[in-house]
Image (spheres, rainbow, N blue to C red):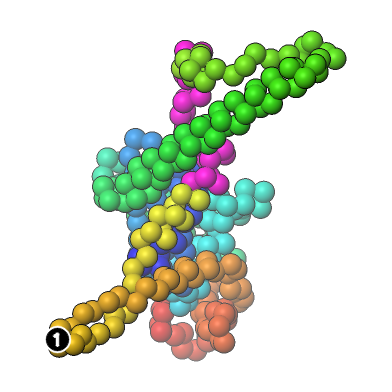
């Protein structure tokens, strides 16, 4: 499984309210590109790009800014983090979306060192494989896990009833009658739940309750999916006495996805001059372009 695909699968869903649009979204951004998945519970949209697309789109949308792709990806991570992960962190960016039957464009507007910065995420309908990978299979796994939890709890309740019965047979008496309970009957409980509670419990609404209540379980299930989907990384050739060759795979763990870039580089300089971002050591740094002979975009 590729790095971006694995990283996106192990990201939680976030609930977004953009004007009149309620959306579920998840994203993964690394130095190699980004992947974004968005759904309005009627359709799922997806975009995954590498640094080549980042360079081209940056030239089209931000003509006054010159930077390596890692710097733009760094800034996009800083803009998306408050929206998707840390809602308590103030966000200086403005988000909007334009939705059609064939595409969904998530628009981002902000500033970078006093210069306007904009970005458009061009999402197209997700493939059936992606829908299955990020929604159908995880939700089925979550349903099975919750069913197993219910069975475990029912077993514990039956054991508690047996324990209480033994106390009563030994002469124990409740000091407060209001604490008395009837023995647990699983079939009666399930029938009552289906009649009285089901309609409220399974109300999906705009997806917000799913995001607020079940993301820890969702992440646990998707991590299990990643572990089961890991492939062997090498092979070994073993010769038998009859000169037959048997190839065996050497099972190795797939590396974890690269951590998303955390902070954007800082630009400085007059507003009307193109800003040039240069890289030093491991962190991209931003610097002003020369006045006499500005360098080309994304040298």
Q: Nearer the viewer, residue 37 or 159?
A: 159
> Residue 296, position in %: x, y?
40, 82
Residue 169 in view (yes/no): yes
> Residue 188, position in %: x, y?
51, 14
Residue at the (53%, 40%) spot, across then down: 214
Q: Residues within 10 Å of mark 1 (few under 14, many from 20)?
A: few
- Provide the residue span drawn in magenta: 195-218
Q: Is 103 placed left or right of 19 in the picture?
A: left
Depicted 291 relative to depicted 48: above or below: below
Q: Which residue is mark 1?
A: 242
Residue at the (50%, 62%) spot, across then down: 76
Residue at the (41%, 70%) spot, across then down: 254
Residue that protrudes farthest toward the right in the picture: 175
Residue 217 is one of the magenta-drawn residues: yes
Q: Nearer the viewer, residue 273 or 53?
A: 53
Secondary structure category for the residue under label 1: loop
């Amino acid at each position: 499984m590729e790095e971006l695909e694995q990283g996106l699968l192990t990201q939680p869903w976030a609930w977004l309210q953009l004007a009149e649009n309620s959306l579920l979204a998840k994203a993964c951004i690394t130095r190699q590109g980004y992947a974004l998945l968005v759904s309005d519970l009627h359709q799922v949209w997806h975009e995954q790009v590498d640094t080549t697309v980042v360079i081209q789109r940056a030239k089209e949308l931000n003509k006054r800014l010159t930077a390596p792709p890692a710097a733009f990806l760094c800034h996009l991570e800083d803009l998306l983090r408050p929206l998707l992960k840390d809602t308590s962190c103030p966000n200086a960016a403005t988000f909007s979306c334009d939705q059609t039957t064939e595409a969904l464009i998530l628009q981002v507007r902000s500033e970078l060192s006093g210069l306007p910065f904009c970005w458009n995420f061009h999402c197209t309908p997700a493939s059936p494989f992606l829908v299955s990978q990020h929604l159908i299979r995880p939700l089925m796994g979550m349903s099975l896990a919750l069913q197993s939890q219910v069975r475990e709890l029912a077993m514990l309740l039956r054991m508690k009833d047996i324990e209480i019965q033994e106390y009563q047979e030994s002469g124990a008496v409740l000091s407060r009658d209001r604490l008395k309970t009837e023995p647990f009957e699983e079939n009666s409980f399930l029938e009552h739940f289906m009649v009285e509670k089901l309609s409220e419990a399974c109300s999906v609404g705009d997806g917000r309750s799913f995001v607020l209540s079940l993301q820890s379980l969702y992440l646990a299930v998707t991590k299990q999916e990643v572990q089961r989907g890991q492939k062997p990384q090498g092979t070994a050739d073993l010769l038998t006495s009859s000169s037959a060759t048997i190839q065996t795979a050497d099972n190795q763990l797939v590396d974890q996805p690269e951590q998303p870039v955390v902070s954007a580089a800082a630009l400085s300089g007059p507003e009307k001059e193109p800003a040039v971002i240069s890289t030093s050591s491991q962190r991209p740094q931003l610097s002003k372009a020369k006045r006499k002979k500005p360098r080309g975009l994304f040298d």
